[in-house]
Amino acid sequence: MNEQSVGSLFDVLLVEDSPSDAYLLMRYFRHQDNPNCQIRWVQDGESALDYLHQRGDYSDAQLPKLIVLDLNLPGLDGCEVLAHTKNDPILKKIPVIILTTSNSESDILRAYNLHTNCYITKPVNLAEFSELYATINRFWLSMVQLPNL
């Protein structure tokens, strides 16, 4: 485990419109023996930008260390949120994982052209879901060194 995960909170912003998918992700992160990890969940692109810019209900929000972003969102879609994030001088330093049902080559190319750090198609069964989140946790929360913003 790296130093950043010991003693300080590791906020993850989850931008996901599906309550069942959000619940699964939050459940798996909690079961990965990572007591310092806090999942902050918003259900649409507008709320994600409000959170990241500490506006409205999110005026006291901490910038996350990691963003997990669905592409298919009501209103502002995931690519619009990604573009905004990667064009901001501070927010662009936050890694963004696209986690979506789309395996469309055009969606994948668009996301990488907008500088996503990772593109993952959502698994279809619980065993694959569990393995995916264990891998995300192990890599992004335990191995990678991320900047303090």
Image (tube, helix red, strand yellow):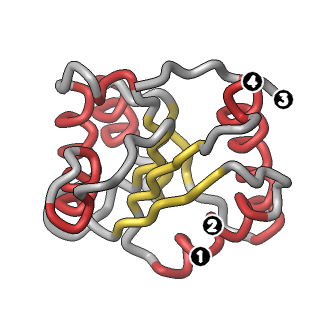
Q: Residues within 10 Å of mark 3 (few under 14, many from 20)?
A: few
Residue type at mark 4 is: Glu
Q: Are marks 4 and 1 in contact (CB under 8 Å)?
A: no
Which numbered tag is attached to residue 1?
3
Q: Quadrant of the N terminus?
A: top right
Of label 4 and label 1, which has the lower sequence position? 4
Q: In the image, is 126 to the left or to the right of 74?
A: right
Label 1: state its secondary structure.
helix
* In front: label 4 or label 1: 4
Which x, y percent locates residue 39?
55, 59
Q: Residue at x 26, y 60 (%)?
A: 58
Q: Residue at x 43, y 36 (%)?
A: 96
* In front: label 4 or label 2: 4
Residue on which the image places disc 2: 26
Using the numbered discs, state the Cα–Cα distance from disc 3 to disc 1 in whole angstroms: 25 Å
Residue type at mark 1 is: Tyr
Q: Nearer the viewer, residue 38 or 101?
A: 38
Using the numbered discs, state the Cα–Cα distance from disc 2 to disc 1 in whole angstroms: 5 Å
